[in-house]
Amino acid sequence: MNISKYEQPTEWFHVTDVFSDFELDIIDKFIPQTSLDINGKRSHNTVKRKFVNVNSPIQLLQVFDKFDEWQMRKVFSEITGVDCYNGKLRIELVNDNAGAHLEKHIDIKEKLITFQVYINEGNLDWGTTIYKDWEHEHATVPFIRNSGWLTHKNVDTIHGIKENSVTGQRHSVLINYIEGDWNDTEQLFHLQ
Amino acid sequence: MTSFKDRHIFVTAERSRASAKFVKNIAQINSVVEACKPLPPTHDILKKFFKNEKEYYKDIFDAELSKSIDENSKYVFYTQSKPDRILEFFPNSIIINYTQDPKQVAKDIVDDSVNSVYDIEYDYLIPQDNTYLRFINILKQQREDLTKADIWAFEHKKKFWQDKYYDQYFKNVENKVVSNMFYRTNIERDDIINFNDKSNIKHVKTKLEDLLS
């Protein structure tokens, strides 16, 4: 995994070479077949979303188990300065439909980190756009298989998916470490 | 390790014909001299042989650098390592960050990998019992005219290169180049001189000479 740090417009990270070819093949297999219409907010579709938890197939759990280990938590803690050792792990397999868009937003502070990895091949401009402020774009993370971006609770990274940019199914994995009480325990890697 | 604190010049770019030409052009500036023996490579060149970047610079690069340079002169390193990695190890350096058209760069890299026999660069720095060197030597025993594309195919398919792999290989290289170029185009720091195909090389040279004087 290669991590590049950016300091503009706020601190955030571009991450490449996250999974092995073998792991990518497994993720491909378990990405939801049905894509979700995302019209502004991902939380509108909570019931239909697919999270990796103890009920998931063992192959899938093996792929993501490394994110539960202290070595990986150490990497994220060191680069972000946020203590990720005790955060609850939440992993979502995402299949966004063509036309998906997400309003500009800042992640809630219960999410210690948000790490999104793009899984399928698509157009470069399907990636997440990061904004300088609520009006002006900074850059769109290139939508490239096995790469992604990361932000954390100590910075206000304004981000979203621009309207009319996604023209096909957009597969990704969303990884969070979470602090505090999380009501939807079935979304967690270890059911509480 | 005083050599790490010196003000070296690094041209950081994806490897391509254009970037190699650019480095030659920059190196012709009067104040930049040639080393008495080849400069040691930055970590990116030998990263498959030496996994730990920090140990490589400390144990190998530093010793080699002191044999190559005259402390009163300036040298140009040509590297694929990104500016942040270079500045971590060489904090006083001048960085020229060269951005290019990713498609053309990917084509250059793939064409070279498919058509050129693979020679291990700087083999005198690599111990004979190095695991990756042994892997390469085994492949060379099987195929005398081993190419970089063969190595990629063996690492991904457990087979030597076949033309049917071309599209996947190209996509793999292109993805890496696009990701790297995204980084290069989004870095703005006072200690980095950004350069692209549309920039005027005279301005870069002037800026460089100002910084060196």
Image (cartoon, coloured by chain):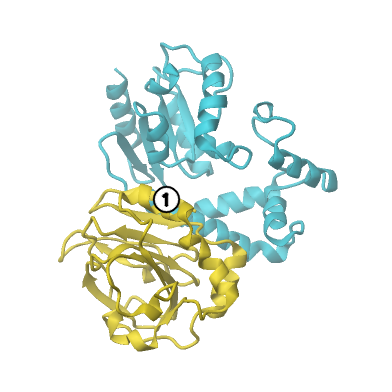
* A192 to the left or right of A30: left
Q: Chain of mark 1?
A: A
Q: Considering the numbered disc 1 on the image, is that residue within a helix, a strand or a loop?
A: helix
* A116 to the left or right of A157: right
Q: Is residue B177 above or below residue B48?
A: below
Of B173 and B155, nearer the camera is B155
What shade has chain B been given?
cyan
* A176 to the left or right of A60: left
Of A48 and B204, nearer the camera is A48
Is residue B43 at all visible to an observer of this figure?
yes
Question: Residue at position x 15%, y 66% from top?
Answer: A135
Specify the farthest residue to the right: B142
Q: Is residue B187 above or below residue B60?
A: below
Question: Residue at position x 57%, y 37% from top?
Answer: B45
Specify the farthest residue to the front: A192
Q: Amino acid at mark 1?
A: Lys
Residue A130 x %, y %: 27, 62
Residue B164 x %, y %: 71, 66
- Which residue has dot 1 on it? A74
The quadrant where residue A23 appears: bottom right
Of A18 and B153, nearer the camera is A18
Question: Residue at position x 74%, y 43% from top?
Answer: B136
Residue A164 x %, y %: 31, 79
The quadrant the C terminus of chain A occupies is: bottom left
Q: Is residue A83 above or below residue B193?
A: below
What shade has chain A been given?
yellow
Of A17 and A108, nearer the camera is A108
